[in-house]
Image (tube, helix red, strand yellow):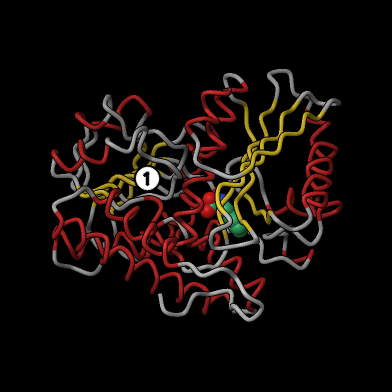
Amino acid sequence: MEDLLKQWDGENLFIRFHHPSGAWIFMAIHSTKLGPPVSGGTRMKFYPDRKAALQDALKLSAAMTSKLALSGIAHGGGKVVIALPPNFDSAMRPDLLRSYGTLLQQIGGLFLTGPDVGTSPEDMNIIAETGDPYVFSRTPEAGGAGDSGPGTAIGVLAAIRVTCNQLFSTNSAASKRILIQGTGNVGRALIEMLQADGAEVLFSEVDKAAIQHFRDEVGLQFIPSAEIYNTPCDIFSPCALGGVLNAQTIPHLQCRAVVGSANNQLAHPTDAELLRHRDILYAPDIAINIGGLMSIIGMESEGWSQPEAFERVTIIVDRTLQQVYQLAATEDIDTHTAALHIAHQRLAAAKPKGKNTTLFIEQW
Ligand code: PHE
């Protein structure tokens, strides 16, 4: 654990052990450079061990700092991971979420959260029972903006279009073969949008009910997990968990580009270089999966309507990704490094927050 913290360049780590369930809550505050506050999702799942959970929290928190900088939101980056014990009793779930809400309350507004892998707007409602007002994405009935999946998908769709433009000189995904990994909140929204665009959508999933739905009812081609990394397609779209682009998978890929919503898709930053050598264009996750947080924060804090939020996400992702591709080409560097470079520049230019600062940093 100590090694992990020594390697991490973040600011604070808060830990709560929830005795009744045996779950660990890791709250990683990576950077307040663009804040306070600090924003980040809450991920709740099983991990092989506590170390893996902490590692995920630390790595995801750093990605959030870059994501917020690239989205133009004047919030710092952080993340919460709730690591469930192997024998977790799901009846403990509400109590665990309320205990976490209390932690948000005690932290006193430094950290604002929303949903992530393993949590939903309904969970946000429960967290808010004790953690109000520091909780985004509650259900509309509870006064929130609801699911962040469609907003994230809108950003990925914009990135797919920019990428199609770059590779095929067309602004649309029509007739492109796109393989979606994961049909969760983002994946399923993206599937609908791509179908509306006339793309040929393939999918991979592990959940039986979801496989049945998308294969048998929607009529999409199902790709079993064992074949996902060597299925020919134009665009591979990871929309599930991180680490899927690595030294084992990259040599097998048969796609022209990778454009997906999952956080931390690269197992290691240098894997972006492996993709580049294979001539696979990588749309960096930190630049393109910002649509969820951006639309939710915009709708809840700035009063944007949903169409306005989606339009703004589209504009920001379109502009940022074009900038990333351009910088990567002119500097002869991989696209992940290019995106980090732009994010770092913005962080370096950040001014200490005064009373009159706006939520969105206009000059970006
Ligand atoms: N899960 C979102 C992400 O990783 C986090 C988020 C969603 C934060 C909604 C705020 C509101 O980008």
**Is residue 156 placed above or below 235 in the rendered structure?**
below
Q: Is residue 96 left or right of residue 328?
A: right
Under circle 1, the secondary element is: strand
Query: At x 84% / y 46%, what residue is drawn?
Result: 102
Q: Which quadrant is home to the C terminus?
A: bottom left
Query: At x 67% / y 49%, what residue is drawn?
Result: 120
Q: Residues within 10 Å of mark 1 (few under 14, many from 20)?
A: many
Query: At x 60% / y 52%, what residue is drawn?
Result: 40
2 or 203, nearer to the observer? 2
**Is residue 181 placed above or below 73 in the rendered structure?**
above
221 or 247, nearer to the observer? 247
Q: Count up the numbered dots.
A: 1
Report the image quarter containing ligand 1.
Answer: bottom right
**Is residue 170 placed above or below 262 in the rendered structure?**
below
Q: Quadrant of residue 37?
A: bottom right
Q: Which residue is mark 1?
A: 180
Q: Position of residue 54 (x, y in %)?
A: 59, 30
**For the residue marked with disc 1, what is the amino acid?**
Ile
Q: Position of residue 235 (x, y in %)?
A: 26, 49
Q: Position of residue 330 (x, y in %)?
A: 13, 60
Q: Is residue 108 left or right of residue 316?
A: right
Q: Which quadrant is home to the N terminus?
A: top right
Q: Position of residue 136 (x, y in %)?
A: 68, 60
Mark 1, ligand 1, within 8 Å: the answer is no
Q: Is residue 200 left or right of residue 41?
A: left
